[in-house]
Amino acid sequence: MTDNLEALSDTLQRAARAAGDILREGYHAAGTIEFDSKGASDFVSHYDRAAEQAIIDTIRLIHPEVGFLGEESGITAAGDSDLRVVIDPLDGTNNFLHKVPHFSVSIAVERGAELLMGVVYQPLLDEMLWAVHGRGAFLGDQRLRLPPARPLNEMLVGTCLPYHGKGDCQLSCRQLAQLMPQVSGIRSPGSAALEVAYVALGRFDAFWSQGAELEWWDIAAGIVIAREAGCKVTDLSGNSAPREWHSLLVAHPDRHGPLAECLTS
Ligand code: IPD
Ligand code: CA
Ligand code: CA
């Protein structure tokens, strides 16, 4: 069954919608949302956990053999499959808890070191961004094609910044100071998965992150979508397939080089 990547991609989208229903309900519920602390600035609510469970249940029903790496439930070994589903059920928990309407569901599938597909779903806008390796990136049923590169001084660039107790503030401040005078604007809206996928949409002209020390489930799905839309995706040393992603730069191929130079000089 899982040889059929289209079928698996459909299942991921269904799973993302199931999670999105739960998050939408939480977002619109009256009052504040209760949460627990997993660590410094690392919060989790009932909705994060319920959304992850809904994703796993939806996928397992049709593809019981795949493994999982979920932010909330950790590793579940695969059965008779070399596929692993990487899940961030709620990317942008801080926004969600403050009722800031910018968060997403992020699901990717990998086979060993190879990323095969990604889904990033924005439940409040009902925007489904998805891609399958070698078959393109889409917003719903509309194929995404990267718009022409803007000059550096017209670029709007997304990033993630360190949180209290997590990440390298000095590095982030240095990179901001290096890039800020070169580009039109820099934004840090608070959902890494969306910010990466927004480059594929042309909403951002580029995305980079290093100081925030992002996790794999924050970026895996966005990376597939950005690549399939035609973006150049590497770490800040220029490696497009590092063993671990300690930094990330996503941009139009014509702008990737100058941005990398600016951020690392
Ligand atoms: C966070 C978001 C945020 C990034 C943080 C992540 P979470 O994920 O992606 O944009 O700056 O580093 O932890 O905790 O909301 O799933
Ligand atoms: Ca996340
Ligand atoms: Ca999360």
Image (spheres, helix red, strand yellow):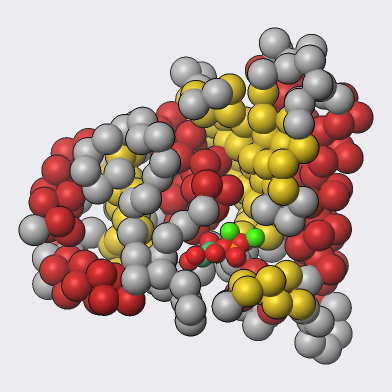
Q: On the rendering, which quadrant does ligand 2 occupy?
A: bottom right
Whole-percent x and y of residue 206? 30, 52
The quarter of the picture where the N terminus appears is top right
Q: Considering depth in this image, is 169 or 195 the residue closer to the camera?
A: 169
The quarter of the picture where the C terminus appears is bottom left
Whole-percent x and y of residue 231? 33, 37
Whole-percent x and y of residue 57? 88, 40
Q: Identify the residue at horizontal 24%, vertical 48% (top origin).
A: 236
Whether residue 99 sits left or right of residue 66 in the image: it is left
Q: Toward which corner of the image does residue 87 lie, by quadrant?
A: top right
* Picture layout, residue 195 above or below residue 169: above
Q: State whether residue 32 appears in this view.
A: yes
Whole-percent x and y of residue 218? 54, 52
Whether residue 221 sits left or right of residue 237 in the image: it is right
Q: Identify the residue at horizontal 84%, vertical 68% (top origin).
A: 46
* Picture layout, residue 180 above or below residue 126: below
Whether residue 64 sits left or right of residue 69 in the image: it is right
* Picture layout, residue 88 above or below residue 190: above
Q: Considering depth in this image, is 265 or 102 the residue closer to the camera?
A: 265
Q: State whether residue 132 appears in this view.
A: no
Q: Identify the residue at horizontal 64%, vertical 40% (top origin).
A: 86
